[in-house]
């Protein structure tokens, strides 16, 4: 891992993800989490202020990068419920089948190398009565923007820490063991190839 990936890139990603449009999206969906919760790709902990201590009994978070998590892990002290962190990717998680009531993923699936394997793992560890709560950027609705996403994706992925601009999030969810119960899709303020958002809830099939 080079100096750019190890030190500069995490700072840039964190700065982008802290912007108001992304924060507004987090505030819509993270409070829906209940019971025993798993967060995929916690990063620097930007979702933590939005969990409701009256609803969450415990929070488990995973992320392959310990360095990024160390930036803001002091936020855990203010949660008001048990928390644990695992440095692991989403493609193979060390949890038993049907362990969690809610799984939260925000702006994470763009960077997971094997997104289908990861989604199948989410299905495995989620309880049959559980819910997947998601907010992701991805493939735009406009063909003209889709073309730009496809053109830019190799360059963006290389310099953006593996981030893909053009993943079809609803299709990824629905073809890997989930039924989408609620889906919203629109541009949020920002650069259009990066700002088409999908958010909602899905349940396991």
Image (tube, grey):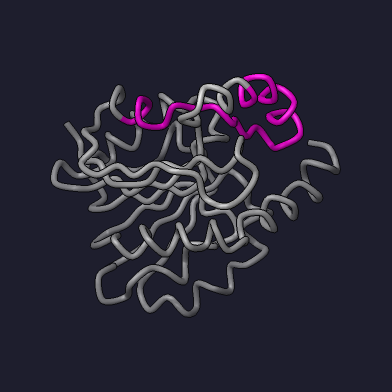
Q: Quadrant of residue 36?
A: bottom left
> Residue 97 at what x, y percent from top left?
24, 39
Q: Name the quarter where the C terminus is drawn.
A: top left
> Residue 79 at what x, y percent from top left?
42, 75
Q: Residue at x 23, y 47 (%)?
A: 131
> Residue 145 at what x, y percent from top left?
58, 28
The span shown in magenta is 148-173
Q: Name the quarter where the N terminus is drawn.
A: top right
Q: Main secondary structure of the magenta part?
A: helix
Toward the right, the furthest residue is: 3
Left or right of 30 in this view: 98: left
Q: Quadrant of residue 32?
A: bottom left
Left or right of 39 in this view: 149: right
**Nearer to us in this view, 109 or 74:** 109
Q: Is residue 127 covered in magenta?
A: no
Toward the left, the furthest residue is: 129
**Nearer to us in this view, 113 or 12:** 12
Q: Residue at x 33, y 37 (%)?
A: 122
Position of residue 53 relative to residue 123, above or below, is below
Q: How many labels sit on residues?
A: 0
Q: Residue at x 20, y 48 (%)?
A: 130
**Nearer to us in this view, 103 or 95:** 103
Q: Quadrant of residue 179?
A: top left
Position of residue 14 relative to residue 91, above or below, is below
Left or right of 109 in this view: 149: right
Q: Is residue 160 covered in magenta?
A: yes
> Residue 8 at what x, y percent from top left?
81, 49
């Amino acid at each position: 891992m080079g100096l750019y990936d190890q030190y500069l890139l995490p700072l840039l990603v964190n700065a982008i993800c802290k912007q108001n449009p992304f924060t507004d999206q987090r505030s819509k969906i993270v409070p829906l989490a209940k019971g025993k919760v798993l967060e995929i790709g916690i990063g620097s902990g930007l979702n933590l202020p939005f969990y409701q201590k009256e609803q969450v009994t415990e929070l488990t978070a995973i992320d392959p990068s310990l360095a990024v998590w160390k930036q803001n892990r002091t936020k855990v002290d203010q949660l008001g419920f048990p928390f644990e962190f695992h440095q692991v990717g989403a493609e193979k998680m060390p949890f038993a089948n049907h362990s969690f009531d809610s799984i939260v993923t925000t702006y994470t699936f763009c960077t997971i190398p094997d997104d289908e394997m990861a989604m199948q793992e989410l299905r495995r560890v989620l309880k049959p009565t559980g819910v997947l709560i998601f907010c992701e950027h991805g493939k735009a609705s406009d063909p003209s923007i889709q073309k730009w996403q496809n053109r830019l994706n190799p360059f963006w992925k290389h310099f953006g820490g593996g981030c893909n601009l053009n993943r079809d999030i609803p299709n990824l969810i629905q073809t890997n063991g989930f039924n989408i119960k609620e889906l919203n899709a629109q541009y949020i303020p920002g650069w259009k190839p990066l700002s088409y958002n999908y958010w909602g809830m899905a349940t396991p099939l």
